[in-house]
Amino acid sequence: MWIPRTNPTVYKALVALQRASAEGLAPRLAELIRIRVSQINGCAYCLHMHLSDARSAEVEPEAVGMVALWADAPHLFTDRERAALDLAEHVTQVGDDGVPDNVFERAAVLFDEVELGQVIAAIVMINAWNRIAVAGRYPAGLDERRMP
């Protein structure tokens, strides 16, 4: 199942939502979120894509390599990045325990309301893409954005 080809209307709507969710987010922060969520969801397709995008966004290799253990490497991530990554982990695994108040409140202190909405939207979007790619058996190394 290849959504861009088989369901182009859905794909175009998702792409529009993706673009809207990324507006105003720093490229580094957006890629860190996408990488971490893709790791949690086991989405090799999206992880491969966003590792490449992180290089293009000039995210240093040390940060990319440590994003799965961001809490143990605070010197590599800003307070805002750590708050966003913590929120990303809880939103991604929302069925486990929800989003704890302290996680949400920490993010709400570091991001204004509009920024926080964008961070949450970015988290939701990469979760949607992960689910499409995992369910559709998309292989790592392929990138529909670069397909004819």
Image: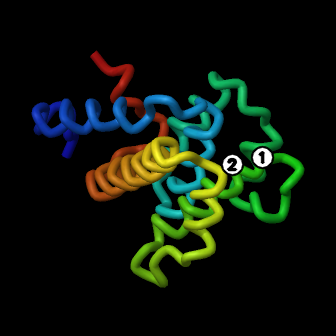
Contact, CB < 8 Å: mark 1 with mark 2?
Answer: yes
Say which residue appears at 62% left-offset and 40% top-offset: 29
Q: In this orientation, which residue lies closer to the viewer: 4 or 11?
A: 11
Q: Is residue 95 left or right of residue 65?
A: left
Say which residue appears at 60% left-offset and 31% top-offset: 26
Q: Is residue 22 left or right of residue 30?
A: left
The residue carrying mark 2 is: 81
Q: Where residue 100 sits in the image (x, y, percent)?
A: 55, 78
The type of colouring in the image is rainbow
Say which residue appears at 54% left-offset and 59% top-offset: 88
Q: Where residue 97 sits in the image (x, y, percent)?
A: 48, 84
Quadrant (top left/top right/bottom left/bottom right) for the C terminus: top left
- The disc placed on residue 78 is 1
Q: In this orientation, which residue lies closer to the viewer: 130 or 1?
A: 130
Q: In this orientation, which residue lies closer to the viewer: 128 or 121?
A: 121
- The disc placed on residue 65 is none
Can the viewer see residue 45? Answer: no
Say which residue appears at 63% left-offset and 22% top-offset: 56
Label 1 crowd (10 A; few <14 / some 14-19 / many >=20): few
Q: Residue furthest right?
A: 75
Q: In this orientation, which residue lies closer to the viewer: 36 or 26?
A: 26
Q: Is residue 28 above or below residue 42?
A: above
Q: Is residue 24 above or below residue 35?
A: above
Task: Classify mark 2: helix, strand or loop.
Answer: helix
